[in-house]
């Protein structure tokens, strides 16, 4: 009897231990996790082509991941002083990125090299807020200029049509049929590729709502959420007719909305303190808040690969990742980004022949320092190998280089940092 009791007691303890481990695993993955982007800039757009490969863009930064965001690699581009607002990913090679002051960037090799289709002077002219490309050549760009620009040759030529209002989001289901939304309750539809636009059947009740984002699933189900006070509008016929179906609870601004299917969706925005994130499982009729006041910033964009795997970007270098649809939130989220090194600005700068670069190594590991020209081509590579913690002063002699602007990038196992210098000979 005693042996049986001892055996039963051990079995109960084992079951409890298994349950506890299961709960820990469940709780550990039932959350949004803050990823290390290596930057504190505000990220305004996130797009993925599969569950591992994606891009983010923000003020002066474009970064790519090939492992679901475990590592983000900053890519060189010619608009480092511009706010970059929107990514349009055609495939693994061709990506467009648009931004402030007539900025349109393009890559045809996954971001290894970015070229400027347009790169207007800082502080002047119209700004681009959103873009949508059907394929490598055909796409539309919208923004502050009360116009929509269209290209059919990959950006070599751009034509525009007046539409009125600032346009924050644009989507086309094919070469003819598209939707846009923007400020003051602006919502328009086209059936001839953007030559003409009309207002669909929608009763806004209050025309002051700004629509910053819209989400389309299966080229049929559409959802927009008003920036102010969160009114939700839904269409089941690709924007021909719209119904007012409710509102997101709370008083704050909604910047982004994304659905993975006709019923499951997420939205996010700003709040005090931090940002706000909500989820719906009934097509937008009801929303449940997912986060708490430890959210490190406002939510500027959301992307979901499926019902479970998704990312949210926002202020202060924030990229959040979930593998279960964001059921719960991490209370311990912090703005701190663990850095294995610190790369200092070179001196003197500008310089004539040689310059000094100070590097603080905080963790033992493999490091390398690379020099890039403005086109993103590696022109020199040094300070490479296993380094122990300490402060290193590198005297770089630029005998191989001609006068111009260059970037120097220090790369570690889990962090990278880029700075710019000027060579004058």
Image (cartoon, rainbow, N blue to C red):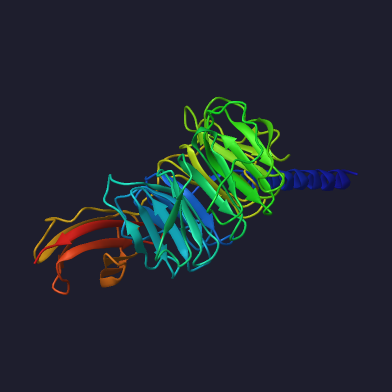
Question: Closest to the observer: 223 or 418?
Answer: 223
Position of residue 109 relative to residue 390, above or below, is below
The quarter of the picture where residue 347 lies is: bottom left
x 36%, y 51%: residue: 339
Q: Name, please, the residue furthest toward the front.
A: 196
| Residue 318 visible in the snapshot | yes
Q: Quadrant of the N terminus?
A: top right
Q: Is residue 244 left or right of residue 157?
A: right
Q: Position of residue 127 (x, y in %)?
A: 37, 47
Q: Position of residue 286 (x, y in %)?
A: 70, 33
Q: Quadrant of the C terminus?
A: bottom left
Question: Closest to the observer: 321 or 13?
Answer: 321
The quarter of the picture where residue 289 lies is: top right
Q: Is residue 157 left or right of residue 383?
A: right
Q: Is residue 187 left or right of residue 263?
A: left
Q: Position of residue 14 (x, y in %)?
A: 75, 48
Q: Position of residue 399 (x, y in %)?
A: 13, 73
Position of residue 354 relative to residue 322, above or below, is below
Q: Name, please, the residue furthest toward the right.
A: 1
Question: Closest to the observer: 245 or 391?
Answer: 245
Q: How many marks?
A: 0
x 41%, y 53%: residue: 98
Question: Closest to the observer: 327 or 250?
Answer: 250
| Residue 391 visible in the snapshot | no
């Amino acid at each position: 009897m005693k042996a049986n009791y001892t055996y039963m007691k051990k079995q109960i303890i084992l079951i409890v231990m298994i349950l506890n481990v299961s709960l820990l695993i469940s709780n550990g993955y039932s959350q949004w996790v803050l990823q290390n982007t290596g930057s504190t800039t505000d990220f305004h757009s996130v797009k993925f082509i599969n569950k591992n490969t994606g891009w983010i863009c923000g003020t002066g930064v474009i970064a790519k991941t090939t492992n679901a965001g475990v590592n983000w690699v900053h890519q060189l581009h010619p608009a480092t002083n511009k706010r970059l607002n929107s990514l349009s990913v055609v495939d693994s090679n061709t990506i467009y990125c648009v931004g402030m002051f007539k900025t349109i960037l393009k890559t045809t090799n996954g971001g290894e090299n970015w070229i400027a289709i347009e790169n207007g002077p800082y502080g002047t002219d119209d700004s681009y807020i959103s873009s949508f490309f059907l394929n490598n050549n055909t796409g539309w760009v919208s923004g502050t200029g009360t116009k929509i620009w269209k290209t059919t040759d990959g950006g070599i030529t751009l034509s525009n049509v007046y539409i009125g209002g600032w346009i924050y989001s644009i989507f086309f289901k094919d070469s003819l049929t598209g939707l846009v939304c923007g400020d003051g309750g602006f919502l328009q539809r086209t059936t001839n590729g953007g030559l003409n636009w009309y207002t669909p059947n929608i009763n806004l009740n209050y025309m002051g709502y700004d629509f910053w984002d819209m989400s389309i699933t299966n080229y049929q189900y559409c959802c927009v959420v008003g920036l102010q006070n969160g009114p939700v509008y839904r269409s089941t016929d690709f924007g021909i007719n719209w119904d007012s179906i409710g509102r997101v609870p709370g008083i704050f601004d909604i910047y982004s909305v994304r659905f993975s299917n006709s019923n499951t969706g997420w939205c996010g925005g700003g709040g005090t303190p931090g940002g706000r994130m909500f989820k719906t499982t009934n097509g937008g009729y009801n929303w449940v808040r997912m986060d708490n006041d430890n959210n490190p910033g406002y939510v500027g964009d959301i992307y979901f690969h499926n019902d479970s795997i998704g990312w949210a970007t926002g202020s202060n270098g924030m990229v959040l990742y979930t593998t279960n649809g964001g059921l719960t939130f991490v209370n311990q989220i912090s703005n701190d980004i663990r850095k294995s090194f610190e790369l200092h600005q070179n001196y003197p700068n500008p310089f004539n022949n040689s310059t000094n670069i100070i590097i603080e190594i905080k963790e033992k590991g493999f490091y390398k320092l690379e020099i890039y020209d403005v086109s993103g081509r590696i022109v020199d590579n040094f300070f490479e190998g296993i380094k122990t913690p300490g402060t290193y002063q590198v005297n770089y002699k630029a005998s191989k280089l001609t006068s111009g602007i260059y970037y120097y990038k220090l790369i570690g196992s889990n962090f990278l940092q880029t700075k710019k210098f000027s060579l004058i000979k």
